[in-house]
Amino acid sequence: MSGHIVCSNQLQQLLVSVSKHFYLQKNGLFKYQEKPLQVSTANVWKSKKRHLVYYVLLDRFSGNFFYEVAVSSSLIPLADFLHYAWCAEKEDDHFHGMPEVISVPKLISLPGLSAGLRGLGVEVIHPSSGFASGIHIIKELEDNIAFYLGQLSIQSLEALRRLKKKVYRYKLQPYSGEDKILKWRENLPQGHPRAVGPYHEFKQYFPEPGEETPGSLMLRSESPQQYPAERPPLRTFFDEPISDVKYDPEKLDKAQDYVFEAWNKDYRQDLIGMACKALSISLYCADAYNLLAWESRDLQEKLFLFKKGITAAELSLGELFFWENEGNFWNVIEARPYMRSLEGLARCYWEMGDLEQAIELFYELLRLNPGDNQGIRYLLACSLLEGGRDAEFAEFIEEHGDEASCFMVYSEALWAFRTGDPWKDGRLREALAENSYVPPYLLGEKWVPYRLPASYSHGSEEEAVLYAKEARAAWKNNAEALVWLKEMTAAFNGEP
């Protein structure tokens, strides 16, 4: 059959595989074990661990595919998976329609499944040992999942499901190579994709729930609503409302100690593990959320975690604390986790392009702590310039304009150029004298490194890198300012 495939949806291949490396811990987060686990679809029901299980339906002609993930303690009924994969009315609509033939491995080919599929007009074949089994796609799928999970701090089943779009984009529509979705669409024969029909009709072709042999994959569910994407999530402590848990200051102190210990860890996974341990002790530990957010490489997850940190801190501090300590927040140790969460959230909004929200939070941080131990004034200056809010910037430098630091003088120079200040050249020369390393980073002659410096000294290249990271968007918004910067830099350095 594989040598005679000439069109899409002619032959599809069903695969169900148990991960040899991922399993779900008691806290609802995945654990990766380097040494392969001795588990398969034949014996997974005997295991005490909750293993990650992959369901894949592959179109053999185009390479287009649909997949779901589950855990061995909550398997997806096979008929449910097939119906959902064949449905056109779903979020992952790049794959749908019943095939003419489906290849089902003997290990998961229950009599009721085969009979039901044939009743629907789908021929069932069982691949021989020499047939291209499609196992390679399972390995590639797990490699992709491991990569994308590695970018997250919350490695849960729901996080896996949210990563599906990234996996599909990478595997099916790569930056270079064949577009498998396009190939599938352009090679559908007449009469395809074949509609699967509503679930209540589809399920009649398969045995009632409970008729399967013990330990086997289920055939279908009782409810017509139990499609894979609509299955109830496996909750973690991140999903629990913090206010539903009684606040205990002693537990919070103990959790904070774990965070302090985590800051000294060299390996990212150890650090994440310590932060999760802290939250298992007290959901009110804002710094644990902060730590996880800093370690995450996913902007939406960072946003979620910083918001959780703010909620935890607000609940643990109480309303009266905010009223009594306004203007002195950083000097109160208990308030610092809240300030770190607030700064993190503001930075997330800024990175997302929501300058209005970011600027509002920067102002709030300065209101709570005018002494500005966090250096928020530098971020506010850059974000005001990036947003074109020159009038606000003018008011801002009335208060902070006497500070002769790299962060302020370069921002003032840009503002002076944009507003036609006659002293703009003098301001830029002052900035160049403060730190001459800045222009190459703003002009794109040097790249801002992915890993930013942990500290800096006055006039150093590390200081220049940190400023350029925050200010380059504001400078790039004005091409004429960059030309001026380049010319002034050359003159300052005595270049012809």
Image (spheres, helix red, strand yellow):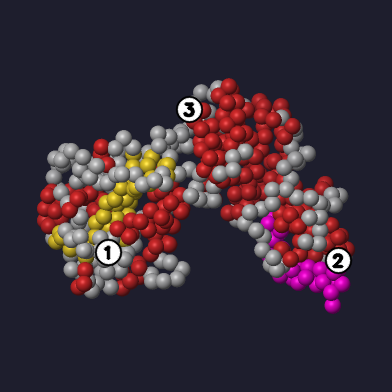
Mark 2 or 1 closer to N-term? 1
Reading the image, the residue beneath label 3 is 244
In the rendered view, tell whether residue 396 sits above or below residue 66: above
Percent x, y of residue 434: 84, 57
Please give left or right for residue 124 compared with residue 17 in the image. Answer: left
Report the number of numbered marks. 3
Reading the image, the residue beneath label 2 is 425
On whether residue 480 falls in the magenta region, the answer is yes
Secondary structure of residue under mark 1: strand
- Count neighbours of disc 3 (C-alpha within 10 A) and say few if under 14, some if 14 to 19, many if 20 or more: few
Residue type, numbered disc 3: Asp
Determine the image quadrant of residue 119. Answer: bottom left
Secondary structure of residue under mark 3: helix
Residue type, numbered disc 1: Asp
Reading the image, the residue beneath label 1 is 59
The residue at 82%/46% (across/down) is: 399
Mark 3 or 2 closer to N-term? 3
The residue at 54%/36% (across/down) is: 275
Q: Nearer the viewer, residue 148 or 304?
A: 148
Mark 3 or 1 closer to N-term? 1
The span picked out in magenta is: 468-496
The residue at 38%/40% (across/down) is: 24
Please give left or right for residue 226 compared with residue 200 in the image. Answer: right
